[in-house]
Amino acid sequence: MIPTDLLTSHITHLECADNEEKFSHLEIQTFCTSANGKKSPLYAKYGSLNKVGKNVLKERTASLWRYFEFLPVLNPENIVSLGEGLTPLLHLENLAKELHIPNLYLKDESLNPTGSFKARGQAVAVSKMKELGIRRCIVPTAGNAGGALAAYCAKAKIDVTVVMPRHTPEIFKQECSYFGAELILVDGLISDCGRVVGEMRAKEDYFDVSTMKEPYRLEGKKTMGFEIAEQMNWQLPDVIFYPTGGGTGLIGIWKAFHEMKQAGWITGKFPKMIAVQTENCQPVVWSFAGKHESAAAYVARPSVANGLAVPFPFAERQILQVLKESGGYALSVTETELMNGVKSFAKNEGLFVAPEGGALLPAVKKAIENKWIGAEDNILLLNTGSGYKYSENFMQI
Ligand SMILES: *Cc1c(COP(=O)(O)O)cnc(C)c1O
């Protein structure tokens, strides 16, 4: 563990993503509403980052808490940890050879507690709930966010209600129940679960941990960006492929790059960010291509990649902004393509990735065919979860 007296968060306040209105991080916050009624996420802001040297990392624990200065928890005693973060970054030698792209890497987030990168977000969100004295919370989820929240709430002794689509594989439900969460099953997708959460909160007091409507899951997920830089020896890749649902990781990684630049930890160009979705649910791809006025009109179907079945991402404008700023793209693959991706990772690299991760491989092929990226580029894929949780979905195909 870290000698806690050495740790100081550099957080100064929260800021509205839309109009830069400032909010106190010392009080419970959710999201911001602009004068025109537009709802946007809040971003944690940090000061004097140029005073934080990379050398602090030398004595730090092998978890995401090694970046404590860039995290929102004020008192290290409030940290609720199950050992999240510092996941392996692997060279995919066999796939690199097969696809003729020598510099193909994968950050394997399946090794996080509860088998997905949702652990990062929930570790920080729950630590912050503990710090702010929140005793009861609720979350709509496609699966992994609920399981991770339930685990960290068990550790923190916070009451939690998880609202999940009924068609989610059993293990996602079982883990919530074993962790002591109240589990509510809903016919439909995460957007329908969100409606149920709204109805329940109208009757009773729950803190809402919905994606991007709570400010600190983003801070946990951004640590992937710090780790990518540290593990690649402070030379960022040329392009990052990210399976996008609510977009927390995509926005978070981009935020991390900016903060590291502010701290002087990295220089030079940032990677192109590529959002990968499934054809069954591709609101970001449609918006990026200007195919619909608003994601609110989008009709989605369920996916074997449960985490990608997010029809109306709350932070869609911020996702599109990252894609644009980075010179990136949004693209989708079919359900068959992403399952073939899972098989290919397994057979060639010994990795049993989540279907969301499987989507990355056909996405890389498409990006190369379209000449969006070069075969010599340094390519990083983010496998967001473990295939071991999706057994029922694999049986469908
Ligand atoms: C939640 C989830 C995603 C989508 O993550 P966002 O950061 O919300 O875009 C992708 N893959 C898996 C396995 C997930 O659980």
Image (cartoon, rainbow, N blue to C red):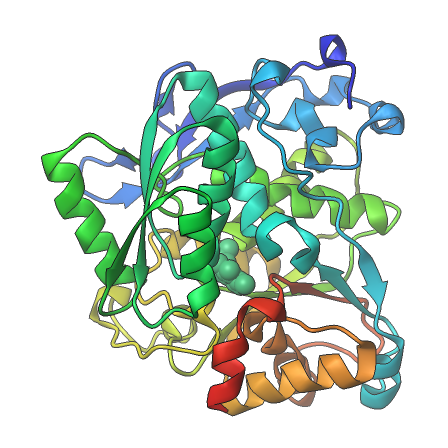
The spot of residue 275 in percent (x, y) is: 54, 67
Give 31 or 383, whichever is nearer the viewer: 383
Q: Is residue 269 visible?
A: yes
Q: Is residue 272 placed above or below 214 in the rendered structure?
A: below
Residue under the point 54% across and 50% down: 118
Please tell me which residue is depicted at 70% across the width and 53% down the height of the picture: 270
Say whether residue 116 is visible.
no
Quadrant in the rendering for residue 192 = bottom left
Q: Nearer the viewer, residue 310 or 376?
A: 310
Residue in the image at 37% along x and 43% along y: 181
Q: Which residue, as the protein is rendered here, is positioned at the far left?
A: 203
- State the residue lying farthest toward the top: 5
At x 17%, y 38%, the residue is: 201
In percent of width and height, residue 166 lies at 30, 68
Q: Please say if 354 is above or below 154.
A: below
Q: Is residue 167 left or right of residue 172?
A: left
- 216 shown above or below 78: below
- Quarter of the image where the N terminus is located: top right
**Relative to 76, residue 36 above or below:** below
| Tally of marks | 0
Q: Position of residue 255 (x, y in %)?
A: 58, 42
Relative to 108, 33 lies left or right: left
Q: Which residue in the rendered view is the most extreme toward the front?
A: 178
